[in-house]
Every structure is written in C-alpha cells, then in structure tokens.
Amino acid sequence: MLAKVLGLSVFLLLSQSSFSATADAGISQALQHEARSAENKKRDAARKPEQTMAFFEVTPQSTVVEVWPGSGWYTEILAPLLAEKGKLYAAHYSDKFTFLSADYMQKGRAEFKAKLASHPIYKNVTVTNFAPLADIDIAPAGSVDVVLSIRNQLYLFDGETSLKHALANFYKALKPGGVLGVVAPRLPDNLINTDWKKTGYVPEPLWLKLAKEAGFSFEASSDMLLNPKDTADHPSGIWSLPPTMAGTEEEKARHQAIGEVNQMVLKFRKPGE
C-alpha cells in the first residue's frame, strides 16, 4: 500500500513538473511571436513578462482577463500564448469611466482595436469594458482563471472606494481557486504621509487589506520588479520615470538612469468552493 501511495505521489509531482515546463515553454514562445513589436521587446528586461506570467500561473490553457491593456504591451504576449487552448478578455476603457476624457478613451480603444485587426493571432481576443466605479462585467461571472491588473493606478480615481470596487469586480469574474495578479507602483514606508493620488504610488499594506476584505486570500509576493533606485519622490510621480519620462531634459536624463518604477508583485487567490 505504501509503495502505491509513494508511486502516486511521484506521478503527481512529475505531472505537475511537466505541466509547469509546458506552460513556461508556451510563455517563452509567445515572447518571440512575430506580432510583438521590437520596441516592446526592449522592455522585457525591465518588465520581466516571462517570470511574471509564470508567477501568476498563466498557462496556454488559461482563461485570462487583462485589465486596461492600454496599447497592448502584454496583449502581444497573452494573445499568442492563449490562442489555441486559452481565452483572453481585454477589459479596456469604458464610456462609464468619467475620470479620463472621452476623447482619450475613444482614441485608446480605437488604437487597441486597430492592433487586434493587424494580425490573425488576435482573432480570439474579446474586448470588454472596465471602469473602477461602474458595474460592468469584465468577463462572464466565475469563468476566469487569472485576472491581471498590471501597472494600473486604480487608487487615483476615488481612493479606497475605486480600489474596493475594482477588487469586487475581479472577484466576481474569477473561478473559485482563480488568481488575481497585481503589479503596481509600491510606496516606500517613509512616504506614507504623502499624496498617493498625485504620485501614483500606493502602499502594499493597502492592497493586502482591501483584497482580504474583498474575499481574497493573499498567497505570495515577489521582489522581481523592485527597483531600489526609485526613491518615489519625483516631480511628476511615477510618470517621471521610463517609459513616460515627464519633465525637463535635465530631469529626464536623471530619471532614465533610475530605470522603471519600483513595482510590487502580489498574488491573491479566490478561495475554492
């Protein structure tokens, strides 16, 4: 009997290892897909997409929501990764989102849809909507394996209220056992009394607290995107640093040397039934 148990344990470990290796291989292949722009590939070293997707358990079989894909930096990776066996929902700007101008949002959505029309690899991407203070389904309820909120400043709009609303939306979309992956600018402890909305940096404990209140369990964090050179006290906040680079030419040269924003990487899970 013991031999059978040990044999089953070894089989399960080997199966999990094989599955992980297959997933990692899929991500590696997606990073090399022809649809990716050369300009976006240049930022791989700073953004570490392969390690990030693996940490958030994204596999070729996953159903994923990408929250606010912007111009599609991650879409260029997720679309080929999920093209055959997975599913990608791109939850872009909504007209119910009043914080940004209608022209800005319409332009962003139009450019993103033009990208999707530019290559067959995007044919199975479904564009949905997301606004942090509106009741919009980013995907069918309980259908998603992974929700990705990467580099979104959700706190900016109405503080904790907008962040709580977003977390409730993410929770609704996820399957029991599903993963919420968060990459967001991390506020240092010594700047806790500064204006978070102005700088774009948010303290990690706030994410942990509000995610728990929303029903998530905190599973793990990673320091892969921490940047100790980022002092988080720049004239234009996170927008001072690459790739946005707001400021004077002198400031830009200084900020270029710092590199990209210091980011926390947090993995939460919706409890299983």
Image (cartoon, rainbow, N blue to C red):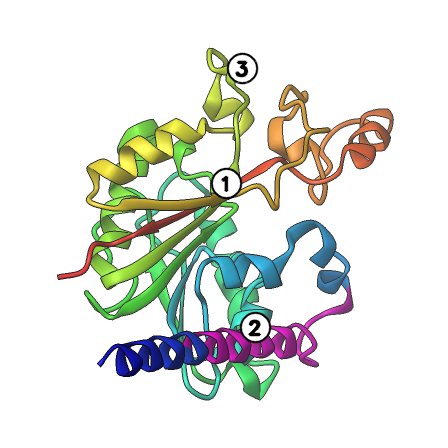
Give amino acid for label 1: Ala
Q: Could you say which is closer to the camera, residue 77 or residue 102?
A: 77
Task: Name the residue tied to disc 3.
Answer: 191
| Residue 73 appears in the picture as rendered | no
Q: Position of residue 142 (x, y in %)?
A: 20, 66
Q: Residues within 10 Å of mark 1 (few under 14, many from 20)?
A: many
Which region of the structure is painted magenta? 16-38
- Residue 82 lies left or right of residue 80; in this view the side is left
- The quarter of the picture where residue 12 lies is bottom left
Earlier residue among tags 1 and 3: 1
* Residue located beneath label 2 in the image: 24
Quadrant of image for the N terminus: bottom left
Residue 175's mark?
none
Residue at the spot x=34%, y=75% of the render? 9
Which residue is drawn at the image coordinates 54% and 76% (left, top)? Answer: 21
Looking at the picture, which amino acid does disc 3 mark? Answer: Leu
Direction from residue 116 to residue 218 in the image, left or right = left
